[in-house]
Image (cartoon, rainbow, N blue to C red):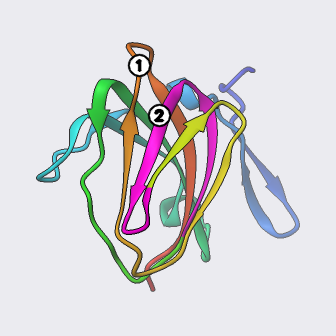
C-alpha cells in the first residue's frame, strides 16, 4: 500500500489510509506491562469521534497489565498464541479469535509463545 497518498478529501471530511508500519510503535510503560507496544492506528487526532483503533504487539512471554476500566474492548487476534486472563479464569487465544471484554471487567492479555502476539483493539474515544 502506498502511504504517500494516505489521506484523501471526501464529502464527509478526510479518509485516512495508511500502512500500520508507518504509525509509531510506542512501548506501553504502564506498571504491570512487559514487552508490549501500541500503535494508535486511528484516533481522535484523525477525526474519529467515536472509536479508536489500536494495534498491540506483545513480545514472547510479555503481557499487558491486569486492569479494568469503564469502557469495553473489541479485539481481533491477527497473529500468535496467548491467553486472556479475567476474573473468570484464563482462556486461550490464537490467530482469528475475536474477543469482547465488557467495561469494568478485569483483564490481561498474555503471550504464550516466543512469536509476537499481535491484535487489533477497538475502544471508545474518551469524550
Task: State which quarter of the image contains the C terminus.
Answer: bottom left
Residue beneath the point at 43% across and 67% down: 88
Q: Nearer the viewer, residue 25 or 89?
A: 89
* Residue 1 vertical position relative to residue 45 in the rendered view, above or below: above
In the image, the segment drawn in magenta is 73-89
- Measure the C-alpha gap from mark 1 to mark 2: 7 Å
Magenta stretch encompasses residue 79: yes
Q: Nearer the viewer, residue 88 or 23?
A: 88
Q: Is residue 84 left or right of residue 65?
A: right
Q: Position of residue 83 (x, y in %)?
A: 46, 41
Magenta stretch encompasses residue 59: no
Q: Are marks 1 and 2 in contact (CB under 8 Å)?
A: yes
Residue receiving disc 2 = 82
Residue beneath the point at 47% across and 34% down: 82
Q: Position of residue 32 (x, y in %)?
A: 15, 50
Residue beneath the point at 72% across and 31% down: 5
Task: State which quarter of the image contains the N terminus.
Answer: top right
Residue extending farthest right:
11
Mark on residue 113?
1
Amino acid at each position: 500500500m502506498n502511504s504517500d497518498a494516505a489521506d484523501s478529501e471526501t464529502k464527509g471530511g478526510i479518509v485516512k489510509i495508511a500502512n500500520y508500519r508507518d504509525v509509531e510503535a510506542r512501548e506501553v510503560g504502564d506498571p504491570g506491562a512487559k514487552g508490549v507496544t501500541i500503535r494508535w492506528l486511528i484516533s481522535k487526532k484523525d477525526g474519529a469521534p467515536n472509536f479508536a483503533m489500536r494495534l498491540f504487539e506483545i513480545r514472547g512471554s510479555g503481557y499487558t497489565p491486569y486492569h479494568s476500566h469503564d469502557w469495553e474492548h473489541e479485539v481481533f487476534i491477527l497473529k500468535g498464541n496467548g491467553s486472556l486472563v479475567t476474573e473468570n479464569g484464563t482462556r486461550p487465544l490464537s490467530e482469528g479469535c475475536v474477543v469482547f471484554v465488557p467495561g469494568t471487567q478485569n483483564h490481561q492479555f498474555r503471550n504464550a509463545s516466543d512469536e509476537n502476539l499481535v491484535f487489533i483493539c477497538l475502544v471508545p474515544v474518551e469524550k
